[in-house]
Amino acid sequence: MSNYHIKNLEEYFQVYRKSVREPENFWEEVAEEHFTWRKKWDNVLSWDFDKPEVKWFENAKLNITENCIDRFLFNRADNTAIIWEPNDPKEEAQHISYGELHKKVNKFANVLKSQGIEKGDRVCIYLPMIPELAYAMLACARIGAIHSVVFAGFSSKALASRTNDADCKMVITSDGSFRGNKTIDLKGIVDKAMTECPDVETVLVAKRTGADVNMQERDKWLEPLLEEASDECAAETMDAEDPLFILYTSGSTGKPKGMVHTTAGYMVYTAYSFKNVFQYKEDDVYWCTADIGWITGHSYILYGPLANGATTVMFEGVPSYPDAGRFWEVVDKHKVNQFYTAPTAIRALAKKNVELVEKHDLSSLKVLGSVGEPINEEAWHWYNDNVGRNKSPIVDTWWQTETGGIMISPIPYVTPVIPTYATLPFPGIQPAIMDENGNELMDKQVDGRLCIKFPWPSIARTVWRDHKRYKDTYFSTYKNMYFTGDGALRDEVGYYRITGRVDDVIIVSGHNLGTAPIEDAINEHPAVAESAIVGFPHEVKGNALYAYVILKEAGESRNQDNLRKEIHQQISEKVGPIAKPEKIQFVSGLPKTRSGKIMRRILRKIASKQTEDLGDTSTLLNPEIVDEIMKDAL
Ligand code: PRX
């Protein structure tokens, strides 16, 4: 029996059992049967969660772009690899075949080389959702450069700090980007960032909006270079454990962590999980609405689908433009079979007139997916009734930037689904629910913290140049376990339900935001003495941010609304507009423990208007502040 494609529940259990009992054999078979290797591995797996160190397919040699492109040239060169749907529906969509993709990526790879990029160099990619983004990533992979994609909604400061952290030699951007009816001056943001990035040698600029941009000495237009470049570029031989990319994710403290993913394990796991989680069949059209700037886009717009020879849609726009029916229009237009989106988008669209959904033919849909945060029951039913029309199973997929691929998820038409449950672990994934004292809760029905006991091929291998942080964050809370930072419960049939973060990461509209960097941005305002950020439930965003701010001078004479605007501005510049708090309350103090730690639990309760049971506040250093904050709560 091939392990690669699971078709019924019995097969799932068989495959799962095998993946746990003989993980090396299991993954070896998958790797052997479905990928192209220049040299096979000497050893399937070695691992030590204490160091921590994980190596899959040791000493194997390959190039991921040969697996995602070249091997399909023989009999599928004319099949569409990428359907690019532009922001403006009046602009024509592009169908990029595997044959064309090969040429585009090779040309781009030759441009990178001509600009001095070599194997192991880091290249920062700050591009909107245009085909050049996919070409740029694959071109890096072709020549062994490590891409570090920064979501093009991030601010210049965030871009600069990520570019410097990874020591990028090059930044790839565009003259601008289109988002709905807005045009964004991406190049201007890059220019600002580059004033803080002395080590960047070249900025490649793709043309998208045609806006006038200020080309400086290190800036080069991409198109003329592409025109001159050859469309043949031999793929570099890469080691299984060579880094493929760095992708930054927020931590609960400090600066963002550059998660490092390596080549072979990431490829095998994303391809395998894509095939099964979406039950992708040849000639299906698959669409994930995420931005490639997030892990979801890396794994399930680009690498996972392409490694299966699939057709993947890449959408430049936003769900609300030109109207809130755009997603459904695109599903209808390209006859999408699998549709993968985030609960925040579903909640926003569910608020609109249902006619916007009903007027489109959605009969092509076979599988619906959800990712990024817990999907609430109401949103689940709306999605199921109106989009799936009760015939397309919803896969609620739980995973993380760090895990590289989907970890807990139903397999559609295989696993019976229950709203809000991510259901069963994927083959190779061994979850554990832990209590706060480090004990694994072995009963079926338990509630605790979610850990993973055994390595899987696409686990991130380190934090870029900060292995200690990798160890401290993921492997120090529980011995010999990868700690996810999430809470979860397991029910009597063994289904998992994710209950949310148990650390200071807040998920707003599906984006992970660490509280510390936002507080730092607020505290840099000259009038601010201290601040604390917490999350509170929000109808559309899932969570929104609530900021408690202490001003340096209690009687700060400036108008509070102006101060709020300035704080918003400060956060937009330092972190990005997604991190702007919904509410800012000025307070004269923050509830603190005697050791000086802010009691966020109390602040969270006040922000969520759950003040009936604040717990014992008498041990606080300043219990009187709680009443004051409650009285003025927004
Ligand atoms: O809290 C979990 C939540 O998103 C976190 C990971 O965020 P990020 O690294 O940005 O990756 C998002 C896309 C994979 C997790 O720790 N999360 C993700 N998917 C789900 C989820 N929470 C509940 N249900 C999910 N399906």
Image (spheres, rainbow, N blue to C red):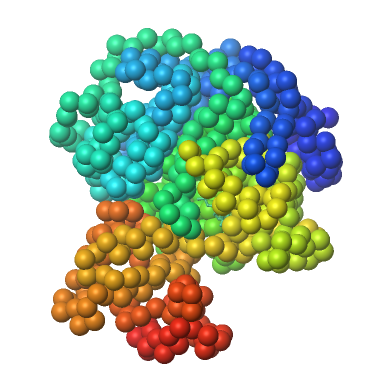
Q: Residue at x 22, y 27 (%)?
A: 219
Comparing 221 with 517, the one in front is 517
Q: Residue at x 63, y 14 (%)?
A: 38
What is the quadrant of residue 477 in the picture? bottom right
User: In x, y percent, where is residue 489?
Assistant: 70, 64
Q: Residue at x 37, y 9 (%)?
A: 230
Q: Quadrant of the C terminus?
A: bottom left
Comparing 17 with 176, the one in front is 17
The answer to whether one can see residue 101 in this image is no
What is the quadrant of residue 606 in the picture? bottom left
User: In x, y percent, where is residue 381?
Assistant: 59, 63
Pick out the residue farthest to the front: 595
Total labels: the figure holds 0
Q: Quadrant of the N terminus?
A: top right
User: In x, y percent, where is residue 343?
Assistant: 52, 57
**In the figure, 374 relative to 83: above or below?**
below
Q: Residue at x 40, y 11 (%)?
A: 231
**In the figure, 315 relative to 106: above or below?**
below
Comparing 44 with 126, the one in front is 44
